[in-house]
Image (cartoon, coloured by chain):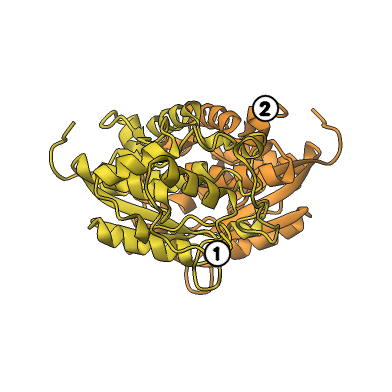
Chain colours: A yellow, B orange
Amino acid sequence: MTLAPQRPAVVLVSGGLDSTTVLAVARDLGFRCYALSFDYGQRHRFELEAARKVAAAHQVARHIIVPLDLRAFGGSALTDEIDVPKDRDESQMAASIPITYVPARNTIFLSVALGWAEVLGASDLFIGVNAVDYSGYPDCRPEFVAAFEQLANLATKSGVEHTARWRVHTPLIALTKSEIIQLGRRHGVDYSLTHSCYDPAPDGRSCGHCDSCRLRLKGFADAGLSDPVPYLPSA
Amino acid sequence: MTLAPQRPAVVLVSGGLDSTTVLAVARDLGFRCYALSFDYGQRHRFELEAARKVAAAHQVARHIIVPLDLRAFGGSALTDEIDVPKDRDESQMAASIPITYVPARNTIFLSVALGWAEVLGASDLFIGVNAVDYSGYPDCRPEFVAAFEQLANLATKSGVEHTARWRVHTPLIALTKSEIIQLGRRHGVDYSLTHSCYDPAPDGRSCGHCDSCRLRLKGFADAGLSDPVPYLPSA
């Protein structure tokens, strides 16, 4: 599918593997992409640095980083001082909602994307949610995405005035990590720009042991590729 | 209705007349109230100052102010440098979505409230939306509120695990401004603590001419009361 050129879309870009793949897909569909990132009190800055590099590499129309400090209410290892779990296998990851879950994160991020999109006259949002490899997050499921589209049609001027039908695009929702990487490669993604590790070394190298590193490494291995980001020797 | 004591709820508190009334109602229903305000780049600080006073006066369990700078995407007189409209009558206000509309504001605010509530183990949110006196905002209507409840049940751990049914309480949704003031008075609200003006003087006095002042003044007049906040002499 190719759209009329320059139709605007807001793309949530974290700097990770998934959202980078989504950005490349959105661009290649012909959207003029507006990249949205959040500074939500991540424990490390490498993620936002990666988001900046990724946005620049895909020549987005604009990239904004919205400060939104969720540490005020805590509840997650990514913003709190809880230890990141290490060396869990996929069944352990799948058995529970991970402690790295940030409460209502995708709802919050999509809501801000909705506000920016309304200002831009856009009615397309892109998000890298995935219901296969990381099914523990409630806000990564198709039912959630459909409910958000419904909400958007009721929450906005354009929805109420019927000048737009909101669409939340989730091109990765049914793909495994290895399929995501293969999709990204077809769209020319340079994965060396991305960052996935929940617990990187001070120099930015990935730990290789947190859930995010393990899923990423397995994805590259399953795709018959090697991951271009640097890992600690113990990884 | 009186609930078992100490059931927690997150209450959106702007420091205005409506949200202050909602806070008093929630407290008197027996909820342990957690007040949530946003520093979203309002052009004046009186609103947040009022929110602090109101939260303290109602002895909330905790009050947090989340920095969330929506000026990054603009689109509203409340955060941009567009002039606030003055001396409009109600038909003019009702005829269009006001330029003071902040895109997707209630969606964003409720989403953050949802995240905090999930951390607190709460499943009740309170918001002072009103579909009568200010019907221009799409995200003040019952359909919007119902869609948000639906989303919350799909977006959260507690919703997915069926340990909670989310409820967004909107005790003001069908009331006129004068009925809201009368309700608040029955719950002991001190309206001198609140702030409504979109365009206050540097000393905090209200202009008396913006849409918000006009609705507020008419509400007090219709209730046969006088507004305790100070206005500029030209008001």
Q: Nearer the viewer, residue A49 or B5?
A: A49
Q: Amino acid at mark 2?
A: Arg
What number is the disc on residue A200? Answer: 1
What number is the disc on residue B165? Answer: 2
Label 1 vs label 2, nearer the camera: 1
Residue at 35 percent of width and 50 percent of height? A20
Residue at 65 percent of width and 55 percent of height? A84
Protein chain holding label 2: B
Q: Is residue B205 above or below residue A187?
A: below
Residue at 37 percent of width and 36 percent of height? A179
The CA span between labels 1 and 2 is 38 Å
Q: Is residue B5 above or below residue A47?
A: above
Q: Amino acid at mark 1?
A: Pro
Pinpoint residue A3: horizontal percent, then vertical percent. 16, 35
Q: Is residue B169 above or below residue B52?
A: above
Pinpoint residue A13: horizontal percent, then vertical percent. 38, 52
